[in-house]
Amino acid sequence: MVEKNKTVDILIELAPQLMQKKNVHSINTKKLEGMGYSKIEITYALSLLLNRNPQLMKRTKSKGKDNTFQRIMPKEEKTLFTKEAYQDILLLRTIGVIDEDDLNDIIERISVYFRDRVSREELRQMINYMIDDEGEIDFTTGIRLNLRKNDQIH
């Protein structure tokens, strides 16, 4: 069985390869396996990533710049995070795990539920909950069980 609270940890480890504009099929997962993550956990994390950012399948190293707009967080918002947690936010936004709506939701949750700055572990737990909640996948069929906020029914 997949331990879902490892999903964000795996995605953070994969982020440098993804930011080098590597094709998803050419990602080296041996390092992750050496760190103790199972193939099922790695596959789950990659499936979730591709569900949240399907453009990664189309991206190749030769393509040009990404023209997506990302909001710049003001100093007041940045101070809600520890340095490590802020770095994780930047990585997860860059690879498309969280979008602007997710970032707004995270900032709102932190403002309401945390008195101090949110740590890396607290942030990862929050993001794991957010992405696993909407990305439940039936491992026998590979079908996502819940609709995402941008899904349309045809």
Image: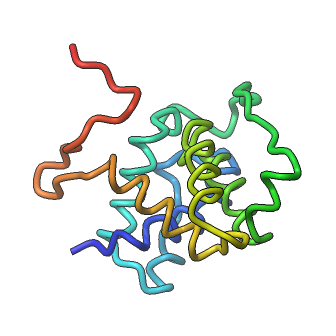
Q: Residue furthest top?
A: 154
Image quadrant occupied by the C terminus: top left
Q: Nearer the viewer, residue 143 or 111?
A: 111
Which quadrant holds residue 116? bottom right
Would residue 128 be found to the left or right of residue 115 on screen? left
Q: Residue furthest left?
A: 140
- Residue at 24% from the left image edge and 41% from the top image edge: 146
- Which residue is at 56% across, 45% downward? 105
- Asked where in the image residue 42 lies, by quadrant, the reply is bottom left
Residue that extends furthest to the right in the rendered view of this protein: 75
Q: How many marks?
A: 0
Q: Nearer the viewer, residue 73 or 138?
A: 73
- Location of residue 150 by image quarter: top left
Q: Quadrant of the N terminus?
A: bottom left
- Locate residue 115, reporting x and y percent: 68, 70
* Residue at figure coordinates x 48%, y 75% from the top left: 30
126 vs 115, left or right, is left
130 vs 99: above or below: below
Where's residue 68, x and y in %? 70, 27
Q: Image check: 91 left or right of 6?
A: right
In the image, residue 130 above or below residue 150: below
**Residue 73 pos. (x, y %):** 80, 44
Residue closer to the observer: 138 or 86: 86
Is 67 left, or right, of 143 in this rendering? Answer: right
Residue at x 43% of width, y 44% of height: 50
Q: 129 or 90, which is in the foreground?
A: 129
94 vs 78: above or below? above
Colouring style: rainbow
Query: Residue 5's x, y, as percent?
Result: 40, 72
